[in-house]
Amino acid sequence: MQVMNPDPARIFQGTAWYYRRYRRPYPVQLPNDMVAYFHLNGSGRLLDLGCGTGELTVPLSAHVADAIGVDPSLDMLEEAKARAAQAGVANIRWIQGRAEDISFDLAPLRLTTAGVSFHWMRQEVVLTKAYELTEVGGGMAIISDISPVRGRDKTEAWKVRRRELIEKYLGSERRAGDHLHKDFISEKRPYAELIAASPFHTFVHKEYPYTTERDIDQIVGFLYSTSYANLRLLGDRADEFEREIRDELSRLVPSGKFIESGKAEVYLLQKK
Protein backbone atom coordinates (compact mmCIF):
# COMPACT_ATOMS: atom_id res chain seq x y z
CA MET A 1 0.00 0.00 0.00
CA GLN A 2 1.45 3.36 -1.05
CA VAL A 3 1.01 6.22 1.41
CA MET A 4 1.03 9.90 0.66
CA ASN A 5 4.39 11.19 -0.42
CA PRO A 6 5.96 13.90 1.72
CA ASP A 7 7.80 16.64 -0.12
CA PRO A 8 11.06 14.83 -1.00
CA ALA A 9 12.95 18.13 -1.08
CA ARG A 10 12.46 18.44 2.68
CA ILE A 11 13.51 14.95 3.77
CA PHE A 12 17.18 15.96 3.86
CA GLN A 13 16.70 19.70 4.22
CA GLY A 14 19.63 21.26 6.05
CA THR A 15 21.90 18.21 5.76
CA ALA A 16 23.79 18.79 2.49
CA TRP A 17 26.88 20.46 3.98
CA TYR A 18 27.34 17.53 6.39
CA TYR A 19 26.36 14.98 3.75
CA ARG A 20 29.21 15.95 1.45
CA ARG A 21 31.80 15.91 4.23
CA TYR A 22 30.77 13.09 6.55
CA ARG A 23 29.14 10.37 4.46
CA ARG A 24 31.18 7.19 4.15
CA PRO A 25 32.76 6.88 0.68
CA TYR A 26 31.73 3.94 -1.47
CA PRO A 27 34.18 1.02 -1.43
CA VAL A 28 36.65 1.74 -4.25
CA GLN A 29 36.00 -1.57 -6.00
CA LEU A 30 32.26 -0.90 -6.29
CA PRO A 31 32.33 1.84 -8.98
CA ASN A 32 35.21 0.02 -10.69
CA ASP A 33 33.00 -3.06 -11.02
CA MET A 34 30.18 -0.94 -12.44
CA VAL A 35 32.52 0.52 -15.07
CA ALA A 36 33.69 -2.95 -16.08
CA TYR A 37 30.26 -4.60 -16.08
CA PHE A 38 28.62 -1.97 -18.28
CA HIS A 39 31.72 -1.42 -20.45
CA LEU A 40 31.86 2.30 -19.76
CA ASN A 41 34.48 3.54 -22.22
CA GLY A 42 33.99 7.28 -22.34
CA SER A 43 30.89 7.21 -24.52
CA GLY A 44 27.20 7.13 -23.60
CA ARG A 45 25.24 8.91 -20.91
CA LEU A 46 25.02 8.37 -17.15
CA LEU A 47 21.91 9.23 -15.14
CA ASP A 48 22.37 9.32 -11.36
CA LEU A 49 19.03 9.33 -9.52
CA GLY A 50 18.93 10.70 -5.98
CA CYS A 51 22.47 11.89 -6.68
CA GLY A 52 22.85 13.73 -3.37
CA THR A 53 26.14 15.60 -3.34
CA GLY A 54 27.55 13.71 -6.33
CA GLU A 55 29.36 10.86 -4.56
CA LEU A 56 28.75 8.59 -7.58
CA THR A 57 28.06 11.13 -10.31
CA VAL A 58 31.43 12.84 -10.21
CA PRO A 59 33.75 9.79 -10.32
CA LEU A 60 31.61 7.92 -12.87
CA SER A 61 31.42 10.97 -15.15
CA ALA A 62 35.02 10.26 -16.18
CA HIS A 63 33.83 7.08 -17.92
CA VAL A 64 30.96 8.52 -20.01
CA ALA A 65 30.50 11.30 -22.54
CA ASP A 66 28.06 13.18 -20.34
CA ALA A 67 26.26 12.70 -17.05
CA ILE A 68 23.08 13.93 -15.40
CA GLY A 69 22.53 14.13 -11.66
CA VAL A 70 18.94 14.31 -10.42
CA ASP A 71 17.94 15.12 -6.86
CA PRO A 72 14.89 16.79 -5.27
CA SER A 73 17.08 18.96 -3.01
CA LEU A 74 18.63 22.17 -4.31
CA ASP A 75 21.01 22.20 -1.35
CA MET A 76 22.32 18.76 -2.32
CA LEU A 77 22.77 19.86 -5.92
CA GLU A 78 24.73 22.95 -4.89
CA GLU A 79 27.15 20.77 -2.94
CA ALA A 80 27.33 18.38 -5.90
CA LYS A 81 28.22 21.27 -8.21
CA ALA A 82 30.96 22.33 -5.80
CA ARG A 83 32.32 18.75 -5.71
CA ALA A 84 32.40 18.63 -9.51
CA ALA A 85 34.10 22.02 -9.77
CA GLN A 86 36.71 20.99 -7.21
CA ALA A 87 37.43 17.86 -9.28
CA GLY A 88 37.57 19.85 -12.53
CA VAL A 89 34.61 17.97 -13.98
CA ALA A 90 32.53 19.82 -16.57
CA ASN A 91 30.40 17.16 -18.30
CA ILE A 92 27.62 16.90 -15.70
CA ARG A 93 24.19 18.53 -15.88
CA TRP A 94 22.34 18.87 -12.58
CA ILE A 95 18.53 18.72 -12.44
CA GLN A 96 16.27 19.31 -9.46
CA GLY A 97 13.48 16.76 -9.51
CA ARG A 98 12.19 13.37 -8.47
CA ALA A 99 13.42 10.11 -9.93
CA GLU A 100 9.84 9.17 -10.82
CA ASP A 101 9.53 12.21 -13.07
CA ILE A 102 12.45 11.55 -15.42
CA SER A 103 11.43 12.07 -19.05
CA PHE A 104 12.26 10.51 -22.39
CA ASP A 105 14.34 13.48 -23.47
CA LEU A 106 17.12 12.05 -21.26
CA ALA A 107 17.44 8.97 -23.51
CA PRO A 108 19.43 7.10 -24.61
CA LEU A 109 21.09 6.12 -21.33
CA ARG A 110 24.04 3.81 -20.95
CA LEU A 111 23.74 3.56 -17.18
CA THR A 112 21.27 4.70 -14.53
CA THR A 113 22.47 4.61 -10.92
CA ALA A 114 20.68 4.89 -7.60
CA GLY A 115 23.26 5.10 -4.83
CA VAL A 116 21.63 4.33 -1.45
CA SER A 117 18.63 6.34 -2.63
CA PHE A 118 16.38 3.75 -4.26
CA HIS A 119 14.47 3.07 -1.03
CA TRP A 120 13.06 6.63 -1.16
CA MET A 121 11.60 6.15 -4.64
CA ARG A 122 8.48 4.62 -6.17
CA GLN A 123 10.58 1.71 -7.21
CA GLU A 124 8.37 -0.01 -9.78
CA VAL A 125 7.92 3.27 -11.66
CA VAL A 126 11.64 4.04 -11.64
CA LEU A 127 12.62 0.55 -12.81
CA THR A 128 10.19 0.72 -15.74
CA LYS A 129 11.26 4.21 -16.79
CA ALA A 130 14.95 3.41 -16.50
CA TYR A 131 14.48 0.34 -18.69
CA GLU A 132 12.61 2.30 -21.35
CA LEU A 133 15.27 5.04 -21.49
CA THR A 134 18.23 2.63 -21.59
CA GLU A 135 20.04 1.48 -24.71
CA VAL A 136 20.52 -2.24 -25.30
CA GLY A 137 23.60 -3.44 -23.43
CA GLY A 138 23.28 -0.68 -20.87
CA GLY A 139 21.45 -0.94 -17.60
CA MET A 140 20.93 0.14 -14.03
CA ALA A 141 22.94 -0.16 -10.82
CA ILE A 142 21.15 -0.05 -7.47
CA ILE A 143 23.31 0.33 -4.36
CA SER A 144 22.28 -0.33 -0.79
CA ASP A 145 24.26 -0.11 2.44
CA ILE A 146 23.54 -2.38 5.39
CA SER A 147 24.81 -0.52 8.47
CA PRO A 148 21.79 1.03 10.18
CA VAL A 149 22.65 3.40 13.04
CA ARG A 150 19.23 2.81 14.54
CA GLY A 151 19.32 -0.98 14.10
CA ARG A 152 18.60 -2.90 17.27
CA ASP A 153 21.13 -5.55 16.28
CA LYS A 154 23.87 -3.17 17.42
CA THR A 155 25.10 -4.51 20.76
CA GLU A 156 28.28 -2.53 21.45
CA ALA A 157 27.66 -0.12 24.32
CA TRP A 158 28.44 3.07 22.38
CA LYS A 159 26.19 2.07 19.48
CA VAL A 160 23.33 1.26 21.82
CA ARG A 161 23.82 4.59 23.61
CA ARG A 162 23.89 6.47 20.31
CA ARG A 163 20.53 4.98 19.36
CA GLU A 164 19.10 5.70 22.81
CA LEU A 165 20.10 9.37 22.61
CA ILE A 166 18.56 9.78 19.15
CA GLU A 167 15.33 8.32 20.52
CA LYS A 168 15.53 10.47 23.66
CA TYR A 169 15.63 13.70 21.64
CA LEU A 170 13.61 12.74 18.56
CA GLY A 171 11.32 9.92 19.60
CA SER A 172 11.31 6.16 19.21
CA GLU A 173 9.88 6.26 15.69
CA ARG A 174 12.46 6.89 12.98
CA ARG A 175 12.08 10.33 11.45
CA ALA A 176 12.30 11.19 7.75
CA GLY A 177 12.49 14.95 7.68
CA ASP A 178 9.11 16.39 8.62
CA HIS A 179 7.51 12.94 8.58
CA LEU A 180 8.06 9.54 10.09
CA HIS A 181 10.01 7.06 8.02
CA LYS A 182 7.08 4.64 7.99
CA ASP A 183 4.82 7.36 6.55
CA PHE A 184 7.06 7.65 3.54
CA ILE A 185 8.04 4.00 3.07
CA SER A 186 4.99 1.95 3.95
CA GLU A 187 6.44 -1.40 2.93
CA LYS A 188 9.82 -2.69 1.90
CA ARG A 189 9.96 -5.32 -0.83
CA PRO A 190 13.28 -7.09 -1.40
CA TYR A 191 15.18 -5.63 -4.33
CA ALA A 192 15.48 -9.09 -5.90
CA GLU A 193 11.69 -9.39 -5.92
CA LEU A 194 11.23 -5.90 -7.39
CA ILE A 195 13.78 -6.52 -10.14
CA ALA A 196 12.27 -9.90 -11.06
CA ALA A 197 8.91 -8.17 -11.61
CA SER A 198 10.47 -5.37 -13.67
CA PRO A 199 11.31 -5.33 -17.39
CA PHE A 200 14.96 -6.05 -16.48
CA HIS A 201 13.95 -9.39 -14.87
CA THR A 202 17.45 -10.48 -13.83
CA PHE A 203 20.49 -9.04 -12.05
CA VAL A 204 24.01 -9.69 -10.85
CA HIS A 205 24.52 -9.11 -7.12
CA LYS A 206 27.81 -8.15 -5.49
CA GLU A 207 28.71 -7.44 -1.85
CA TYR A 208 31.47 -5.24 -0.42
CA PRO A 209 32.10 -5.65 3.33
CA TYR A 210 33.89 -2.71 4.94
CA THR A 211 35.19 -1.50 8.27
CA THR A 212 35.40 2.21 9.02
CA GLU A 213 37.19 4.00 11.86
CA ARG A 214 35.76 7.38 12.87
CA ASP A 215 36.45 9.97 15.55
CA ILE A 216 33.75 11.71 17.57
CA ASP A 217 33.54 14.68 15.17
CA GLN A 218 32.83 12.29 12.31
CA ILE A 219 30.23 10.41 14.34
CA VAL A 220 28.36 13.64 15.07
CA GLY A 221 28.83 14.99 11.53
CA PHE A 222 27.38 11.83 10.06
CA LEU A 223 24.27 12.09 12.25
CA TYR A 224 23.74 15.66 11.05
CA SER A 225 23.81 14.33 7.47
CA THR A 226 20.85 12.01 8.05
CA SER A 227 17.13 12.40 7.54
CA TYR A 228 16.45 11.27 11.12
CA ALA A 229 18.94 13.10 13.40
CA ASN A 230 19.90 16.38 11.78
CA LEU A 231 20.17 19.87 13.24
CA ARG A 232 16.87 21.06 11.79
CA LEU A 233 14.97 18.29 13.54
CA LEU A 234 16.82 18.82 16.82
CA GLY A 235 15.98 22.53 16.76
CA ASP A 236 16.71 24.37 19.99
CA ARG A 237 17.83 21.11 21.65
CA ALA A 238 20.73 20.65 19.19
CA ASP A 239 23.42 21.98 21.55
CA GLU A 240 22.16 19.83 24.40
CA PHE A 241 22.06 16.74 22.16
CA GLU A 242 25.57 17.32 20.87
CA ARG A 243 27.04 17.84 24.34
CA GLU A 244 25.41 14.68 25.62
CA ILE A 245 26.32 12.45 22.71
CA ARG A 246 29.93 13.67 22.71
CA ASP A 247 30.26 13.15 26.47
CA GLU A 248 28.53 9.76 26.56
CA LEU A 249 30.26 8.22 23.55
CA SER A 250 33.68 9.55 24.54
CA ARG A 251 33.21 8.04 28.00
CA LEU A 252 32.33 4.66 26.48
CA VAL A 253 35.19 4.73 23.94
CA PRO A 254 38.13 6.51 25.65
CA SER A 255 40.44 5.85 22.69
CA GLY A 256 38.24 8.06 20.51
CA LYS A 257 38.34 5.41 17.76
CA PHE A 258 34.84 4.31 16.81
CA ILE A 259 34.82 1.20 14.61
CA GLU A 260 31.83 0.37 12.44
CA SER A 261 31.46 -2.51 10.04
CA GLY A 262 28.90 -2.84 7.32
CA LYS A 263 28.26 -4.09 3.84
CA ALA A 264 27.58 -2.24 0.63
CA GLU A 265 25.63 -4.14 -2.00
CA VAL A 266 25.06 -3.49 -5.69
CA TYR A 267 22.47 -4.94 -8.02
CA LEU A 268 23.54 -4.78 -11.67
CA LEU A 269 20.63 -4.86 -14.12
CA GLN A 270 21.27 -5.12 -17.85
CA LYS A 271 18.93 -4.45 -20.78
CA LYS A 272 19.40 -7.28 -23.26
Image (tube, helix red, strand yellow):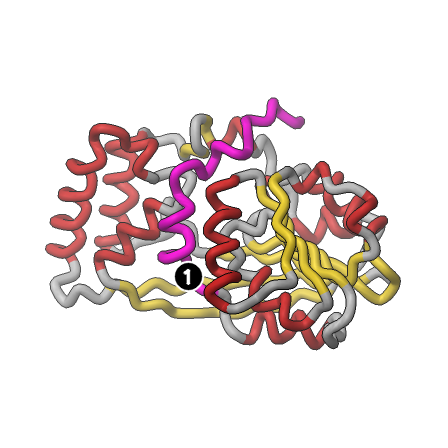
Q: Residue 231 appears in which quarter of the rendering?
A: top left
Residue 144: x and y, percent? 56, 55
Left/right placement of residue 129 relative to residue 36 reads: right
Crowding around mark 1 (Cα neighbors within 10 Å: few <14, some 14 to 19, many 20+) is few
Q: Secondary structure at mark 1?
A: loop
Q: How many marks?
A: 1
Residue 141: x and y, percent? 68, 60
Q: Quadrant of the N terminus?
A: top right
Q: Residue at x 22, y 66 (%)?
A: 257
- Find disc 1 in the rendering and name its residue: 24
Q: Quadrant of the C terminus?
A: bottom right
Residue 92: x and y, percent? 63, 58
Q: Residue at x 18, y 53 (%)?
A: 249
Q: Which is nearer the eye, 33 or 248?
A: 33
Left/right placement of residue 83 relative to residue 65 reads: left
* Residue 43 at least partly seen: yes
Q: Which residues lie in the magenta part?
A: 1-25
Q: Residue at x 73, y 67 (%)?
A: 65
Q: Which is nearer the eye, 24 or 162?
A: 24
Q: Which is nearer the eye, 248 or 115?
A: 115
Magenta stretch encompasses residue 16: yes
Left/right placement of residue 127 relative to residue 85 reads: right
**In the image, residue 100 above or below residue 191:** above
Magenta stretch encompasses residue 239: no
Q: Residue at x 59, y 47 (%)?
A: 50
Residue at the top extreme of this rendering: 4
Residue type for callout 1:
Arg
* Residue 151 at least partly seen: no
